[in-house]
Image (cartoon, rainbow, N blue to C red):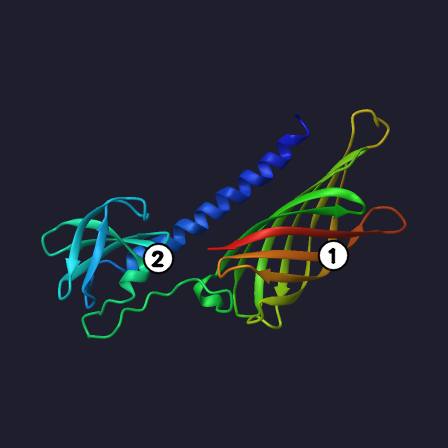
């Protein structure tokens, strides 16, 4: 159980970072939709009691009615009609309405090939670090269509020692519009090695490191993708020679 605590902390940290990024993204949309009004141009739009198709229809707004957008939750938007009745409408239905200028409403959805619609991403990965099992979590922010900054935490589950790593990286994706998109990364950080209690003659060590990697991102949807990567590490020790290690990881990531 003690060995698992750092790993639980790693996953909890990712969950917290993902939640904050997710909240920022929805808050942005909520701010954009304050007092924004749209007009129904289809025969009708169904308003439901909650943000899912399983909730019952509470009212039907007919063609010509004006609706006020209040807030968004996943693929649903809460609205209010002229009679102050509130309900939830699917985004795909609101895309058929018109704004005050008479133009069709445009609501930007996350797209894997447009970084401006999904600045944040996060993921969990598993693999091997120097032939030993490794679990990793990361959060990244896209600065341009090709370049992102990434922070990651990893735990190596060795038989003789426990290794924890923290690193910052720059990732370059030369073909961002490809659904199967290769990437390159470079970065550095800190690696802490804690021998097991039975190895009392060996002290804990903390060293800086640098790494370079290559990988592939396979987008299964506009919001989710599978990520495979291989990294070469250079660990700078106090010994006469530095150490090297190879790592490969596979995992699932999501855009926010």
Q: Residues within 10 Å of mark 2 (few under 14, many from 20)?
A: few
Whether residue 204 sits left or right of residue 69 in the image: it is right
Can you identify the residue that label 1 sits on? 231
Image coordinates of residue 25 in percent, x first then y, are 40, 55
Residue at the (34%, 53%) spot, across then down = 27
Alpha carbon separation for disc pair 1 and 2: 35 Å
Mark 1 lies on a secondary structure that is strand
Kind of element beneath mark 2: helix
The answer to whether residue 35 of the structure is visible from this angle is: no
Q: Earlier in the sequence, mark 1 or mark 2?
A: 2
Residue 52: percent from the left, percent from the top? 33, 47
Q: Is residue 69 left or right of residue 72?
A: left
Cβ–Cβ under 8 Å for marks 1 and 2: no
Which residue in the rendered view is the most extreme toward the left?
A: 83
Q: From this viewpoint, which residue is outermost toward the front?
A: 43
Q: Residue at x 65, y 31 (%)?
A: 4
Residue 142 in the image: x percent, y percent?
52, 63
Q: Which residue is mark 2?
A: 28
* Image point (22%, 70%), residue name: 98
Tell me the tag on residue 81: none
């Amino acid at each position: 159980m003690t060995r698992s605590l750092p790993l639980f902390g790693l996953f909890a940290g990712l969950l917290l970072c993902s939640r904050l990024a997710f909240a920022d993204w929805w808050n942005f949309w909520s701010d954009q939709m304050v007092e924004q009004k749209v007009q129904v141009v289809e025969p009708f739009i169904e308003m439901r009691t909650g943000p899912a198709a399983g909730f019952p229809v509470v009212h039907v707004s007919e063609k010509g009615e004006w609706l006020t957008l209040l807030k968004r939750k996943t693929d649903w938007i809460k609205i209010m009609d002229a009679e102050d009745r509130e309900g939830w409408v699917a985004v795909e239905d609101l895309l058929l309405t018109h704004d005050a200028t008479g133009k069709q409403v445009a609501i930007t959805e996350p797209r894997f090939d447009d970084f401006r619609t999904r600045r944040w991403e996060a993921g969990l990965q598993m693999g091997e670090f120097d032939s030993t099992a490794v679990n990793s979590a990361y959060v990244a922010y896209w600065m341009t269509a090709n370049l992102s900054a990434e922070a990651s935490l990893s735990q190596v589950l060795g038989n003789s020692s426990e290794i924890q790593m923290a690193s910052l990286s720059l990732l370059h994706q030369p073909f961002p519009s490809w659904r199967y998109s290769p990437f390159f990364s470079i970065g550095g950080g800190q690696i802490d090695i804690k021998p097991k209690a039975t190895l009392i003659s060996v002290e804990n060590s903390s060293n800086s490191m640098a790494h370079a990697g290559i990988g592939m991102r396979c987008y299964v949807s506009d919001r989710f993708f599978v990520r495979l990567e291989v990294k070469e590490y250079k660990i700078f020790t106090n010994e006469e020679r530095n150490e090297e290690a190879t790592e490969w990881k596979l995992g699932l990531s999501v855009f926010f």
